[in-house]
Image (tube, helix red, strand yellow):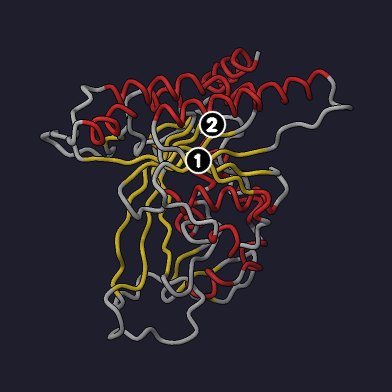
Amino acid sequence: MNRICSGSIFNGIPQGRITCFYGENSTGKSLIAYQTAITALKEGKIDRVIVVDSEGGVLTRNFEDAGVDLDKVTYLPVKSIEDCSVKMTQMYDMFDQCHREYLDDPDNNDDIRALVILDSFGALTSEKQLKDALEKDKMVADQGMSAKMRNALIRGLMMKVVTSNVGLICINHSFSGPEMFPSKIKNMAGGEGIKYASHLIVQCEKLLIKSANDDFLTGFETEDVDKNKGMYKGNKLKFFTVKNRVVVPGYEAVVYIDFKNGLSKFDGLVEDAVKFGFLEEVRGGYICKSWSDKRVTYKELMSNGKIWDTFLEDFDKKSQEVMKYSNATSQELDKIEEEIGE
């Protein structure tokens, strides 16, 4: 997942920019957003996470189970687009002011090291719709007002996110359109503004895996799967970069999550490791020459990090080389980034 966002397996989403994860329900959008926040907190890259909730689906248990200090997690419920706009604009204005004070006098001021998650952008509705339901006893179409207000919200935050250096992750929904020919890229809810404002857009999809399917394993299975118990054993999640200003877009990552055993952090890297020449696919498994001349099974490969340690840094360098923009394009993007920063 890190690779398709940054080109490196050690880096993730861009700091101080807007990132959007969108897709249907249960496609891993919130999972990736919260895991990103949890990892950043544990590694000391940020000091606080602010979760702006418009759906009522946020569980602080996700952070608690991961061993995160809940004092570092701020929960901010919002009822409407207007409510969200006021709270987030005021919050980012404070972030921006604190960051400027830090840049002016870093010895006497602390920088803001935080990450904001908006869950979800597509669920925001206008106060007019809520008011009509209460006062007129019916839901009246808002004639596109909600979409316009969402666009105004995200465009108003766009530069605040950059100048404050506090990243924003927006979770959004996808929907099926009236297109005659299906497209790999799904339609995103919430208007066009989020598409232009986002530095990185990742489309999320899912496929349930049946219990009898042995093609998908985490490497942590301790016993044979009971093929007669339960209809499904896990989810195959596919992440596809629709837009990316860091590395070339259009890359995808496929991750298998087992309902019982979780996932392996090396899942999704095997195919490229073979392509780059670090692994050789043979009957019944793989050969990693930097580790041993003996064959290793897929299960061993997924569960033994020592095998990956023998070539992971070289793999990362090769990955960044393959996925980066051309020099001319990269220089132009860097120039734009510098102008935005000023």
Judge from the rendering whether residue 109 lies leftward or rightward of residue 11; answer left or right: right
> Which residue is pictured at 38% across the width and 69% down the height?
216
Q: Position of residue 193 (x, y in %)?
A: 38, 23
Q: Is residue 150 above or below residue 47?
A: above
Measure how far apart labels 1 and 2 are at the Cα level: 26 Å
Position in image of residue 260 (x %, y %) = 44, 75
Which residue is identified by label 2? 246
1 or 2: tag closer to the N-terminus = 1
- Residue at mark 1: 52
Kindly indicate whether the residue at mark 2 contacts the one at mark 1 (C-beta within 8 angstroms). Answer: no
Residue 15: where, in percent of width, then height? 61, 34
| Amino acid type indicated by mark 2 | Val
Task: List x then y, in percent, for residue 172.
Answer: 37, 39
Determine the image quadrant of residue 47: top right
Between 73 and 67, the one lying in front of the other is 73
- Residue reaching furthest to the right: 107
Which residue is located at x 33 percent, y 29 percent? 126
Check residue 280 in the rendering and tell me which mark sits there, or answer none. none
